[in-house]
Amino acid sequence: MKTILTVDDSPSIRQMVGLTLTQAGHHVIEATDGRDALTKLGEQAVHMIITDLNMPVMDGIELIRQARATPQAKTIPIVMLTTESQPEKKQAGRAAGATGWIIKPFSPEQLVGVVAKVLR
């Protein structure tokens, strides 16, 4: 069982992502923003992070930058899950260390497929 940290300020998105990943056999930890995610990342090992881009307190790009600077998240997959699809936003995500990008709205099958691909 892989542990996945999901980060989104929307409770409904966290619930949908969490339910989808739990049904696919993963353990899910939820965080409400980047700072919350970094705290949880320091508390236990995770195999992957799925984060929103636009969040209060700390956005997804800053979360990726700071997470990549920690030993526990230096090499794990980090996927952005966001409504943003502009090339410059994707480039900023890649530059920060994002592994991939999923555009909202997304299907549960799409999410599970991306997770399976990056966790191989």
Image (spheres, rainbow, N blue to C red):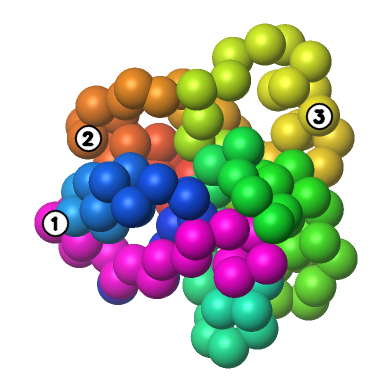
Which residue lies at the image location 64% right of the left edge and 79% below the top edge?
Answer: 39
Mark 3 to mark 2 CA distance (whole Å): 26 Å
Highlighted range, magenta? 21-37
Mark 1 to mark 2 CA distance (whole Å): 10 Å
Q: Quadrant of residue 112?
A: top left
Whether residue 64 is visible, yes or no, is no
Give amino acid for label 1: Gln
Q: Secondary structure at mark 2?
A: helix
Give amino acid for label 3: Ala
Q: Is residue 16 left or right of residue 45?
A: left
Vertical arrangement, residue 43 with respect to residue 19, above or below:
below
Q: Is residue 9 left or right of residue 110?
A: right
Give coordinates of residue 74: x percent, y percent: 76, 64
Give coordinates of residue 6: x percent, y percent: 45, 57
Which residue lies at the image location 78% right of the left edge and 76% below the top edge?
Answer: 71
Give coordinates of residue 40: x percent, y percent: 56, 78
Mark number, residue 23: 1
Quick one: quadrant of the N terminus?
bottom left
Q: Is residue 68 magenta?
A: no
Labels 1 & 2 near each other (Cβ < 8 A)? yes
Graded by Cα atoms within 10 Å as few (under 14), some (14 to 19) or many (20 or more), the crowding at tag 3 reads few
Question: Hey, which residue is sitting farthest front in the picture?
Answer: 56
Judged by depth in the image, the label closer to the viewer, 1 or 3, is 3
In the picture of the structure, the residue carrying the numbered disc 2 is 108
Q: Quadrant of residue 30?
A: bottom left
Give amino acid for label 2: Pro
In the picture of the structure, the residue carrying the numbered disc 3 is 92
